[in-house]
Image (cartoon, rainbow, N blue to C red):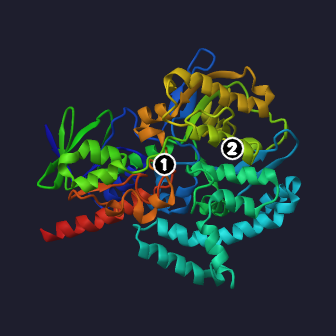
Amino acid sequence: MTKRQDVLVIGSGHNGLVTACYLAKEGYRVTVLERQQQLGGAVSTETMFQSAQYPRGFRMDVGSSVHIMIHQTGILEELELEKYGLDYIEMDPIMSYPVPDGEGVIHFFKDLERTLDSIANVAPEDVENYRQFVEFWGRINEGVLKAFMVPPSGKNIVTELAKGQIRNGGMFEKGKQLGGLQKILSSYGKVVDDAFENPHLKAAIMWFAAQSGPTPDHPATGDFAGWQSMLHQSGAKHPRGGSGMLTQAMAEFIRAHGGEIITGSPVKEILIEDGTAIGARTADNEYRAEAIISNAHVQTTMMKLVGRDHLPSSTYEKVEDINVGNGFGMVIRCAVEELPRYSACPDDPHIHKGMQLLAPSVQYMNNAIGDYMQKKPPVDPAVLAMTFSEIDPEMAPSGGHTLYAWAQWHPYELQDGMHWDDIREREAQKIYDVVTRYAPNMEGKLIDWYIQTPLDIERKHGLVRGNVMHVEMSFDQMFMFRPIPEMSEYKTPIENLYLSSASCHPGGGVFGAAGYNAANVILKDLKKSWFKF
């Protein structure tokens, strides 16, 4: 059976749904095909662990949880998603660093002055350093954010950075331009080490910067640490009811604007005639459309759904050679009887409201990276803990609490003789043990858990080699280089076939910018093609 619509979106990840929303808003008939039974891709939430004691179970995010970047884009406001059920809860502090083997905690509040007051309690020598750090990178990131919200090109980047040099009295202080540029081109490990004195503050900021993927020694990653400045503008938020409420709201928007979302319908191939994409085939149906948009991973799209026969050999080889990386993390999503009571701050009233940074030192992280480089799971993983049931009781409606613990660095491809299916529970226990070292009360408090190794992440979400950013976020794969130069503006060599995933500029995280930028490109092309008629 053949079905016709104006626009066909393959995959219901949040970037694909952002694109679909903007096209539906402009009056195009949109159909979204999702391979899983539940929509949302890596921004989705499932109910798990129902029992006699906990009949309503626990709400578990099965992908991302903390929403930061999307609040800097204007997408939520333009689509008015609160009308479609989206309700955000502020995470404040955004994150906290309990001092290992001691007393005290550093809270990173949205309000800079409150953050500085907290830093003063643990790292008084760095109060002024942190203020200067936020000011320096804040100026830079105003231009970077604008560059993120347009299709990438060398011209756009240079233009936005040049504007930033003029804005607010200059991106850099007079006479410090070269030093400022050097920081941008430095690794985030060096940026953090140069900026701060206190080992606890260094560990906290480096661990948060590491969430982007590359190791701390990668060149031109300085802004992974510098993006800390933007936290004091947007803060961090959690959707009431779970991360998946964002994609559920977008799905409601699409339906309200005449579109449809079909789950449980994996696409087998993209239909191509004479170099033009005309539709897609599932096991049951064929769909035809004027524009085909893939929200899937770029390698899945071009190598599997399109295939070698429809691409120039040089293009196919470039896609094949994209650095996807070797995974970098795994996560345990736990139902627990109570929340962690951290030895460093057992009665702190704020710590469960945001992320909890459990990385004792920079050397501790370097040790984990050393294991990763040898294709071994870390002996001692660095952990980012999240306790959303504290701010959102809907996450544990029958009682108890939720505890998510994301850890790094975990290679997808392991040393000879090791396989993730054989060691997943052992490695999950290591992560939980890190929590209990910081919070001894958690010993024996686990009700159940959902484990996601890099291999599990690939299986669940189609994220190749378990990289949650799709492809490595190294400088040679950012901006106009992402995913490859000839596809950097969301178009492919196949006419009418577009990309809208985190494989594209500006990359991963709950951001929506790739979907937003793709929508603008596609809308221009559609209006041109319809005008011809």
Quarter of the image where one finds residue 98: top right
Residue at coordinates 45% horizontally, 45% vertically from top-left?
247
| Secondary element type, mark 1 | loop
Q: Position of residue 374 (x, y in %)?
A: 57, 37
Residue drawn at point x = 63 percent, y = 71 percent? 182
188 vs 501, left or right, is: right
Q: Which mark is residue 469?
A: 1
Task: Indicate left or right for 484 with 78 as reference.
Answer: left
Residue 246: image location, x then y, percent? 49, 47
Residue toward you, 416 or 294: 416
- Give coordinates of residue 325: x percent, y percent: 47, 45
Tell me the amino acid under the disc marked 1.
Met
* Marks 1 and 2 in Cβ contact (< 8 Å): no
Q: In front: 89, or 138? A: 138
Residue 188 place in picture, x, y as percent: 64, 58
**Residue behind mark 2:** 365
Q: Nearer the viewer, residue 424 or 92?
A: 424
Q: Earlier in the sequence, mark 1 or mark 2?
A: 2
Q: Is residue 463 visible?
A: no
